[in-house]
Image: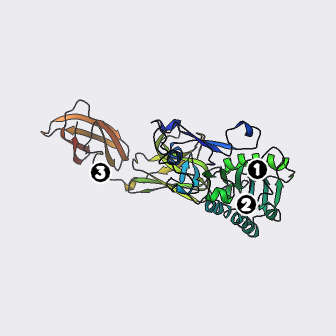
């Protein structure tokens, strides 16, 4: 077994304390001075996948080892979840030899547009060598690597020296097994490949290994900083480009009114760690309240469109803005847009309350074409007046009244709107 991972607290019922620790480091005093990397992930979904892998090798899902049921190497099955979205980061997880991990590494290499940086204990796979050369021939012209076991049987080190800056690692041992794709180019969705898996046939076909593929510009940048140190120590002097971190680029935000509903639409050109958008509304541009939340796309270099409907269209002029929020809690406001009502489009209407039946609160909406005195009254089944819900001057447009039925028994009631010569009623049902 060649895995290197710990799982913490994944068996309890508290998802927020589930941690995965994994990387290239064997927990031994021998490797304290070696060049290794580890990553820690606080997420219940990925710890669940690693728990399933561990239990397959442990032979049970309890604290008791079952040696008659343990499975290693080619006995194991491809039976874990592979794709995760953790904090807006796309992460893929694979185990060897069951999951065909090298094919997943090849797919990431095949996506390289600008650069491939690798720090490897050993690299002996012909298909990985060929994939790197293929990307080089297709225009990926920045290949750099540091390898420890440059003379291992089947080494690809010398072949790759013909296509980029490949250096032998100086002492102490470099035990890394990572590759970084397009780390300096956020628009190309940088990728980090890491874990226990050497780029070798033994790792692909025989050993028990674990690999993570992480698509995130920040993680790639951290690994690129680590790689720069290894590269410089080995004699490299080339320039590294610091990635341009693209924020959420809002390219449009507008509104239309259809059938008394304000329809908001906005679009983004790019997004980075975008949790989403709070849609906020105001009647005076001073006091704002939130209407709802629209989930963002995390990190994306593609255009995205968003929509939100506001069905409570109350006054002649109302204002909207977006509060774009990142996963770390930071936020930024959009421009403010103004929506003016078309008074000629309003008429006398009394709408059905919602929800109905209800307990204990429901909303009653009505529409009037001009500012005037109105009465909204509640009656019981016998026609007796129970409560005055509104009595006063209402503005043109649609008005919403929240009715809280405290102190009233369950039953059928009627609410009536009187506005000048207009009279209308609807039935509501209170169920307690």
Q: Residue at x 75, y 45 (%)?
A: 226
**Closer to us: 150 or 270:** 150
Residue underneath mark 1: 242
Q: Residue 307 placed where, x, y %? A: 48, 55
Mark seen at residue 84: none
User: Does any portion of residue 75 appear in the rendered image?
Assistant: yes
Vertical comparison of 406 with 364: above or below: above
Work out how far the residue at label 2 is from the one at label 1, CA to CA, in angstroms: 31 Å
Residue at x-position 48% and y-position 50%: 339
* Residue carrying label 2: 124
Question: What is the x, y in percent for residue 341?
Answer: 44, 51
Mark pair 1, 3: CA separation: 60 Å
The residue that mark 3 highlights is 349
As drawn, is 402 to the left or to the right of 243? left
Q: Is residue 371 visible?
A: no
Describe the element under mark 3 as helix, strand or loop. strand
* Residue 78 drawn above or below residue 386: below
193 or 150: nearer the viewer: 150
Pointer 1 local density, CA inside 10 Å: few below 14, some 14–19, many at least 20:
few
The outermost residue toward the left is 382
């Amino acid at each position: 077994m060649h895995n290197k991972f710990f799982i913490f607290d994944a068996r309890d019922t508290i998802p927020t304390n589930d941690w995965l620790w994994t990387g290239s480091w064997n927990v031994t005093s021998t490797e304290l001075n070696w060049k290794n990397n580890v990553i820690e992930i606080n997420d219940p979904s990925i710890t669940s996948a690693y728990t399933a892998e561990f239990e397959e090798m442990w032979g049970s899902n309890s604290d008791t080892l079952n040696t008659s049921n343990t499975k290693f190497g080619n006995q194991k099955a491809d039976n874990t979840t592979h794709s995760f979205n953790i904090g807006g980061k796309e992460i893929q997880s694979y185990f060897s030899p069951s999951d065909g991990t090298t094919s997943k590494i090849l797919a990431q290499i095949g996506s390289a547009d600008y650069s491939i940086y690798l720090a490897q204990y050993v690299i002996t796979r012909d298909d990985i060598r060929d994939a790197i050369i293929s990307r080089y021939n297709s225009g990926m012209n920045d290949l750099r690597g540091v390898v420890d076991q440059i003379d291992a049987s089947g080494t690809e080190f010398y072949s790759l020296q013909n296509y980029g800056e490949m250096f032998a690692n100086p002492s102490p041992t470099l035990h890394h097994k990572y590759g970084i794709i397009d780390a300096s180019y956020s628009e190309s969705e940088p990728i980090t490949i890491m874990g226990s898996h050497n780029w070798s046939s033994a790792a692909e076909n025989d050993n028990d290994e674990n690999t993570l593929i992480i698509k995130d510009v920040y993680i790639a940048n951290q690994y690129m900083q680590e790689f720069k140190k290894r590269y410089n120590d080995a004699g490299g002097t080339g320039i590294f480009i610091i990635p341009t971190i693209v924020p959420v680029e809002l390219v449009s935000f507008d509104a239309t009114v259809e059938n008394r509903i304000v329809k908001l639409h906005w679009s983004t050109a790019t997004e980075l760690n975008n949790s989403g958008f709070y849609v906020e509304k105001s009647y005076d541009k001073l006091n704002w309240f939130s209407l709802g939340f629209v989930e963002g796309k995390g990190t994306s270099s593609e255009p995205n469109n968003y929509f939100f409907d506001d069905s409570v269209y109350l006054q002649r002029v109302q204002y909207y803005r977006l509060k774009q929020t990142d996963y770390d809690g930071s936020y930024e406001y959009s421009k403010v847009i103004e929506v003016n009502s078309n008074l000629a489009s309003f008429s006398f209407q009394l709408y059905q309350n919602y929800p109905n039946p209800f307990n204990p609160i429901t909303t009653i909406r009505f529409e009037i074409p001009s500012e005037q005195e109105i009465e909204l009254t509640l009656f019981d089944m016998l026609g007796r007046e129970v409560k005055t819900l509104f009595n006063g001057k209402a503005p043109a447009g649609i008005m919403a009244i929240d009715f809280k039925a405290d102190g009233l028994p369950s039953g059928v009631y009627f609410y009536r709107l009187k506005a000048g010569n207009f009279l209308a009623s609807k039935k509501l049902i209170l169920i307690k």
